[in-house]
Amino acid sequence: MSVQNEPIRPTWATREMPILASALRRSDAGESFPSLEEIRNEVGLDVPQMRAGLSALRDALPPYMEFTMHMAGPNVTHGFVTSIGERTRRELGSWPSSNALLEDIVLALEKEAETTVEPEAKSRIKSAADVVSGIARDVLVAALAARVGSI
């Protein structure tokens, strides 16, 4: 089968996301310029797939991360990550998002309802959790998104 007849396969979960996760973990652990070759080895990609994944991450708007890459041959990906974008942090959950904040609020309300012994207070807290996770969710997500966007 020629390449032009092959179906388009999704690569986010098996290629781009593992590259991003490794780069973010390494950066957050204090590596100043995480090595692309070490990331490639960690995620288990061959060189052409690593290069394709890096290109996709760089070409996204806004880019997920910035890096320098030096073509050194067919068996290695020389280069390093120079910065991790906010988009990556949001995508991988290390940066606040309106949905994540709302989920935290709902979980806190549910936990409080479980530990509250006074029946009327327990009922009000459960109702608040229902409202926040139900009918008011879209309004709250929009309000949180406006606030999170200003962080």
Image (cartoon, rainbow, N blue to C red):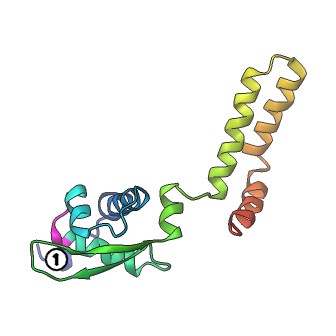
46 inside magenta stretch: yes
Q: In the orientation shown, which residue stands out farthest toward the right?
A: 120
Note whether 133 is above or below 54 in the view shown: above
114 inside magenta stretch: no
Q: Main secondary structure of the magenta part?
A: loop
The residue at the point 34 percent across, 65 percent down is 16
Please tell me how many numbered marks the rendered image carries.
Answer: 1
Image quarter for residue 26? Answer: bottom left
In the rendered view, does 72 fall on the left or right side of 110? left
Which quadrant of the figure contains the N terminus? bottom left
Image quarter for residue 50? Answer: bottom left
The range drawn in magenta is 44-48
In the rendered view, does 82 fall on the left or right side of 96? left
The residue at the point 13 percent across, 81 percent down is 72
Q: Position of residue 73 (x, y in %)?
A: 10, 79
Q: Inspect the image, locate mark 1, and give the three-letter code of the amino acid beneath it.
A: Val
In the rendered view, does 20 fall on the left or right side of 36? right
Work out whether residue 141 can be spotted: yes
Work out whether residue 10 can be spotted: no
Q: Position of residue 142 (x, y in %)?
A: 74, 62
The residue at the point 52 percent across, 54 percent down is 93
Nearest to the observer: residue 51 or residue 25: 25
Which quadrant of the figure contains the C terminus? bottom right
According to the picture, the residue beneath numbered tag 1 turns out to be 3
Note whether 126 is above or below 139 in the view shown: above
Note whether 103 is above or below 67 in the view shown: above
Q: Position of residue 69 (x, y in %)?
A: 26, 80
Q: Secondary structure at mark 1?
A: helix
